[in-house]
Image (cartoon, rainbow, N blue to C red):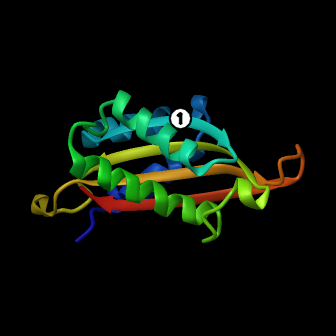
Amino acid sequence: MLKQAKGRIGRNAVLLALFEEEEEGKITAHLDNLQWRYCKGKVGSMELQKIVASVETAAKRNNVVNGELYREMHALYHAVVEAVQGVTRGQVELGDLMRTVGLRFAVVRGNPYENSKEGEWIAVALYGTIGAPIRGLEHETIGLGINHI
């Protein structure tokens, strides 16, 4: 069974991605209290591999995942791809379709289940804009990916 709402890993990742820097104090204190690992970052690109690379680099640099362990990197990769599918509405293409994104991202790792034997999970939230590569011709978008480690 999942923990209470405040222990939901996807919810926490989305909130962390949505909050501006001056607003994030409560959510980061909450994540620290849960003893969960997390990081935030920004990426803008017309290339999907740059989004994946930015999220993976931030997660490794902030010790959210161990880059030496395939299992952890594989779980992170699948969470990122799932989040990108939400951002792109299922068509995981950007530049070839003349679309670009400007995103804030959050990666949260923790144990969202009451039974600790369920193990750790990782959530990736992406929030920002998507549209034509012309300023003003974009709209908001959001994506969430969750995977077990």
Q: Position of residue 54 (x, y in %)?
A: 51, 37
109 in relation to 81, above or below: above
Q: Position of residue 96 (x, y in %)?
A: 73, 58
Q: Position of residue 53 (x, y in %)?
A: 48, 40
Tell me which corner region of the image, top left, top right, bottom left or bottom right, holds residue 31: top left
Which residue is at the far left? 117
* Amino acid type for the residue under numbered disc 1: Gly
**Which residue is painted at 69% across and 56% down in the image?**
94
Which quadrant: the N terminus? bottom left
How packed mark 1 is, by other alpha carbons closer than 10 Å (few <14, some 14-19, many 20 or more), is some
Which quadrant: the C terminus? bottom left
In this figure, which residue is indicated by the disc labeled 1?
A: 41
Q: Give the left or right position of residue 15, taking residue 129 as reference.
A: left
Which residue is at the far front? 96
**Which residue is painted at 15% across and 63% down in the image?**
118
Q: Give the left or right position of residue 75, taking residue 55 as reference.
A: left
Q: Give the left or right position of residue 9, taking residue 127 as reference.
A: left
Helix, strand or loop at label 1? It is strand
Q: Position of residue 122 (x, y in %)?
A: 33, 53
Q: Nearer the viewer, residue 81 or 119?
A: 81
Q: Give the left or right position of residue 31, taking residue 119 as reference.
A: right
Q: Nearer the viewer, residue 55 or 11?
A: 55
